[in-house]
Image (spheres, rainbow, N blue to C red):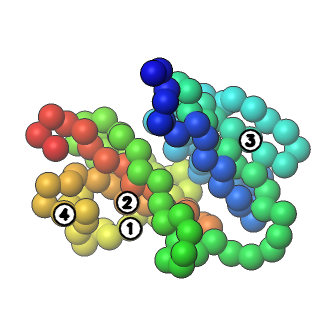
Amino acid sequence: MGDFGLLHHVELQVSNLEASVGPWAWMFDVLGYTPYQEWSGGRSWRHGSTYIVLANAPRDGTHDRRVAGLNHLAFHAGTTRDVDRLWKAAPQHGWNQLYVDRHPWAGGDEHYAAFLDNAERFKVELVATDPKY
């Protein structure tokens, strides 16, 4: 069945595309995404058959992941060592470390992950996929 059931794409509406591109471009690059499309109001990155779009929101407002809607994106991020490397590098690329006091176990005792958010409060979870997890 090929890609049946897999995500085709996700579109994130941002308040300022130019300000948002830098942190997201870094994140997508380190996770193996490549630039896919570019137009005046948006950009996209592709990984396999899935792509993620950043687009200027057509209306003013702020994103709040704690109300009804999308809470966060979670990505397979390699080994625990990879997750640790990304956690340490993320602040230099526009990402804030979340749950610092519980890192890397903020998702539970059996879930090794880094939780980050950016200036618009979009949250990303980078999950270790070592065999023991």
Q: Nearer the viewer, residue 130 or 95?
A: 130
On screen, residue 7 versus residue 133, left or right, reads right
Please report whichever mark, 2 or 3, sits nearer to the chain's N-terminal start: 3
Q: Report the Cα–Cα distance between label 4 and label 1.
A: 14 Å
Label 2 – label 3 distance at C-alpha: 24 Å
Q: Which residue is mark 1?
A: 98
**Residue placed under numbered mark 3 in the picture:** 43
Task: Give the quadrant of residue 39.
Answer: top right
- Category of crowding for the residue at label 1, using alpha-carbon neighbours closer than 10 angstroms: few (below 14), some (14–19), many (at least 20): some
| Residue 67 picture location, percent across and down | 54, 78
Q: In which quarter of the view is residue 76 placed? A: top left
Earlier residue among tags 3 and 4? 3
Residue type pointed to by label 2: Phe
**Residue at (20% x, 54% y) in the render:** 111
Residue 22 appears in the figure? no
Question: For this view, does 123 lie left or right of residue 86?
Answer: right
Disc 4 versus disc 1: nearer the observer:
4
Alpha-carbon span between mark 4 and mark 2: 12 Å
Q: Earlier in the sequence, mark 1 or mark 2?
A: 1
Query: Which of marks 1 and 3 precedes in the sequence?
Result: 3
Q: Residue at x 79, y 35 (%)?
A: 38
Which residue in the protein does label 2 denote? 115
Label 3 environment density (alpha carbons within 10 Å; few <14, some 14–19, many ≥20)? many
Left or right placement of residue 97 versus residue 32 in this view: left
Task: Choose between 24 and 50: the one closer to the eye.
Answer: 50
Q: CA distance from mark 3 to mark 4?
A: 34 Å
